Image (spheres, rainbow, N blue to C red):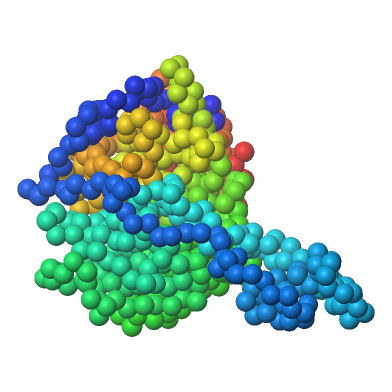
C-alpha cells in the first residue's frame, strides 16, 4: 500500500485563500478574485448567490403550547388518559411510573399497582426497543437528524442551500434553499420560477426526468412531489395542477432518483427496509423491494439502467438488477456504512464506493450484463485510492473521510470533498476539494491535479457536474456562503488518454493482475492495490506475471480479464 495514489502526491494547497479556484486548464488549476463568466454555446450561466437575509426561515421551537397554561389539579387516571391521547401510550406509562413526584396525590392500592405495572411494561418495552435498535440503528433519531445524517449536503440543517441539481440533458438547474423553497434557474436568468407546496418540507433530494425537459421529482419528508412545469408559462408560482403527490409509505425520505430512461423513480429512507419503485407514467408504486433488517439511505442508478445500487444503514451495499429485482451484497473490507458512490460513465462498468470514517475508495467492476436473478460483477471490492489525512509542509491538513464523490459524464474528472474530524465544529479539513484526472481505457488510472477551494472559511456543501457542458467538464460547487461557483475544467479529450498503449484483454468481467515491471518514478499514477494471488490460471492472453506484480500500482496498468467458466475461486486480497 505504500505506493498507492494518496494525497501526498498533490502539491501543497494555497494557505492564503484570498482567491477562489476559477478553472482548470490542461491539468493546471488557476485562481482569482473575480468569478469566471462561464459561456457555453453562446449562453451565459446564471449567477446564483443565496443571501441569508433574503430567506424567510420557518419558525422552529421545542416549546409546547401546553406550557403557557396552568395545570388543573385532576386525578391521576384522568391525567393518564389525557397524556395517552396527546403524547402517546409510552409517555403515559412514564408519567404513571413517576407519580411519586406528585406528593399531593394520595397513595392507594390501585395507584401502587398501576405504578408497578407501568414500570414492568416500560422495562419490557426497553428490551424490545434495544432489539429493534440493533436491527435498525437509526430508529430513535428524529427526522431532522436523519435528513442531516444522510443528505448529500455537507450541512443540510444549517446550510443556505440544501439541494442543487442540474438537468441531465438541459441547461437549467434546481436550487432548494434552507426554507425548502425551490427556484429554477436557466440560461435566461430574467425569469426564475418558485416551487412551493405545503407538503414540500425537509427536502433532501431533487431529480430531473432525463427524457422530459420540465419534470422533476422532489423528495420531501413523507411524500414525493412530481412537478410538471409548462415551459411557455411565465408564472412566478406554478399552479397546483402542475403537481402530483406520490405517497411511498416511507418517512423520512432521504433520496429519490429517476433512472436514465425516465420510466422509473426509486425512493428510500433510513427508517424503512424497502425501496419503492415508481412507474412515472402511471404515477404510482409498481414494485416494492424489501430486505429485512436493513434500511436504505441513498440510491444510484447505473448509466445503462440495468442496475440499481443502494447504500444501507449496515456495513454493506446492495446492487439490484432490473429484470427480476434480485440483489447481491458487497461488504468485503467494509469497516462502516457506505457514505457515497458513483458509477463510471457512460457505460457503468465500474462502481466507486466510499465508506464513512474510512480513508479509502473501493472499486467494483461490472463488465458483464446482468441476468435474471444474477446481478453480475465480481464479488471483490478493491481498494483503489488512499485519502488518509496528510499534513503538507505548510501545515495544511487534508483528507481523512470522504463526504461526497462525483464523476463527470465521461469519467475523465473525479472530485472528492472531505469531512473534518468534527466538521460541525472544525471545518479545517473540509475546505478542500481533491480533483483527479481519471482514465478507464482500459486501465483505471488516477492523476492528482490539485485542490479546489473557495474563499477563506468557505466550505463546499454540494458538488455536481453539468453533463451538458460542451468544452470539457463543468464542476459546480455550492459554498456555505450561499455562492454557487462554476469551475470549467478545460482539457483536450484527445490527450486525456491512458499512458499505456498495450491492448485490452478480450471480454472484461473482473479485476486481474498481469502487469509488466514499469518505473514508479512519476506521480502520474494509476492506483496501487495489494498483492494478489490466484489459485487457478486465468483465461487471458496476459497470464505471465511475477509474484511481485500488483493489481493497482503506479505506472502499472490495472487490467481486467475473464476468469475461466466464471469461477471466482481466487484467494482474497491481502
Whether 226 is drawn above or below 510: the answer is below
Q: Quadrant of residue 498?
A: top left
Name the image quarter holding the N terminus.
top right
- Residue at image position (15%, 42%) is 38
Relative image position of residue 65 (x, y in whole percent): 55, 68
Q: Position of residue 42 (x, y in %)?
A: 7, 48
* The residue positioned farthest toward the right in the image shown: 109
Front one among 262 and 226: 226
Question: Residue 370: x percent and y percent?
Answer: 43, 65
Residue 339 visible, this angle: yes
Front residue of 5 and 181: 181
Whether 33 is drawn above or below 349: the answer is above
What residue is rendered at 60% in x and 69% in y? Answer: 69
Q: Quadrant of residue 142?
A: bottom right
Q: Residue at x 45, y 52 (%)?
A: 157
In-image side of 5 versus 113 (left or right): left
Q: Residue at x 39, y 30 (%)?
A: 525
Horizontal side of 522 relative to 567 (left or right) equals left
Amino acid at each position: 500500500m505504500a505506493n498507492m495514489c494518496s494525497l501526498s502526491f498533490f502539491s501543497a494547497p494555497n494557505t492564503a485563500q484570498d482567491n477562489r479556484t476559477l478553472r482548470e486548464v490542461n491539468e493546471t488549476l488557476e485562481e482569482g478574485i473575480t468569478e469566471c463568466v462561464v459561456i457555453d454555446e453562446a449562453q451565459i450561466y446564471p449567477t446564483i448567490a443565496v443571501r441569508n437575509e433574503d430567506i424567510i426561515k420557518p419558525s422552529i421551537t421545542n416549546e409546547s403550547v401546553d406550557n403557557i397554561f396552568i395545570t388543573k389539579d385532576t386525578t391521576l387516571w384522568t391525567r393518564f388518559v389525557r397524556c395517552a391521547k396527546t403524547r402517546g401510550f409510552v409517555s403515559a406509562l412514564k408519567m404513571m411510573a413517576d407519580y411519586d413526584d406528585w406528593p399531593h396525590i394520595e397513595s392507594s392500592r390501585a395507584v401502587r399497582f398501576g405504578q408497578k405495572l407501568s414500570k414492568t411494561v416500560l422495562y419490557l418495552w426497553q428490551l424490545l426497543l434495544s432489539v429493534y435498535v440493533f436491527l435498525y440503528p437509526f430508529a430513535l433519531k428524529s427526522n431532522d437528524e436523519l435528513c442531516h445524517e444522510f443528505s448529500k449536503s455537507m450541512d443540510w440543517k444549517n446550510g443556505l442551500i440544501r439541494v442543487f441539481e442540474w438537468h441531465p440533458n438541459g441547461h437549467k438547474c434546481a436550487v432548494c434553499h434552507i426554507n425548502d423553497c425551490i427556484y429554477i434557474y436557466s440560461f435566461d436568468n430574467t425569469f426564475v420560477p418558485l416551487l412551493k407546496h405545503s407538503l414540500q418540507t425537509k427536502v433532501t433530494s431533487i431529480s430531473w426526468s432525463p427524457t422530459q425537459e420540465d419534470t422533476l421529482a422532489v423528495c420531501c419528508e413523507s411524500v414525493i412531489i412530481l412537478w410538471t412545469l409548462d415551459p411557455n408559462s411565465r408564472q412566478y408560482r406554478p399552479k397546483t395542477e402542475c403537481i402530483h403527490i406520490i405517497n411511498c409509505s416511507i418517512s423520512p425520505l432521504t433520496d429519490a432518483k429517476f433512472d436514465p430512461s425516465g420510466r422509473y423513480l426509486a425512493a428510500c429512507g433510513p427508517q424503512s427496509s424497502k425501496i419503492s419503485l415508481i412507474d412515472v407514467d402511471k404515477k404510482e408504486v409498481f414494485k416494492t423491494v424489501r430486505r429485512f433488517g436493513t434500511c436504505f439511505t441513498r440510491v444510484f442508478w447505473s448509466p445503462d439502467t440495468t442496475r440499481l445500487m443502494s447504500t444501507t444503514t449496515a456495513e454493506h451495499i446492495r446492487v439490484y438488477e432490473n429484470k427480476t429485482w434480485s440483489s447481491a451484497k458487497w461488504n468485503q473490507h467494509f469497516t462502516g456504512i457506505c457514505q457515497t458512490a458513483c458509477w463510471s460513465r457512460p457505460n457503468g462498468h465500474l462502481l466507486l464506493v466510499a465508506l464513512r470514517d474510512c480513508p479509502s475508495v473501493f472499486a467494483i467492476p461490472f463488465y458483464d450484463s446482468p441476468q435474471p436473478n444474477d446481478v453480475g460483477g465480481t464479488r471483490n471490492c478493491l481498494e483503489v485510492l488512499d485519502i488518509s489525512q496528510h499534513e503538507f509542509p505548510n501545515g495544511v491538513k487534508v483528507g481523512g473521510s470522504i463526504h461526497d464523490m462525483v464523476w463527470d459524464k465521461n469519467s475523465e474528472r473525479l472530485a472528492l470533498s472531505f469531512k473534518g474530524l468534527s466538521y460541525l465544529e472544525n471545518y479545517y479539513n473540509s475546505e478542500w476539494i481533491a480533483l483527479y484526472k481519471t482514465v478507464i481505457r482500459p486501465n483505471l488510472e488516477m492523476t492528482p491535479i490539485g485542490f479546489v477551494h473557495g474563499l477563506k472559511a468557505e466550505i463546499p456543501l454540494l458538488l455536481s457536474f453539468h453533463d451538458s457542458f460542451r468544452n470539457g467538464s463543468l464542476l459546480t460547487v455550492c459554498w456555505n456562503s450561499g455562492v454557487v461557483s462554476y469551475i470549467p475544467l478545460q482539457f483536450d479529450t484527445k490527450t486525456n488518454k491512458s499512458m499505456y498503449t498495450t491492448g485490452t484483454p478480450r471480454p472484461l468481467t473482473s479485476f486481474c493482475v498481469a502487469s509488466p515491471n514499469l518505473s514508479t518514478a512519476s506521480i502520474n499514477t494509476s492506483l496501487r492495490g495489494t498483492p494478489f494471488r490466484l489459485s487457478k490460471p486465468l483465461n487471458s492472453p496476459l497470464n505471465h506475471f511475477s509474484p511481485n506484480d500488483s493489481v493497482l500500482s503506479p505506472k502499472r496498468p490495472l487490467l481486467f480479464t475473464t476468469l475461466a467458466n466464471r469461477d471466482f475461486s481466487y484467494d482474497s486480497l491481502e
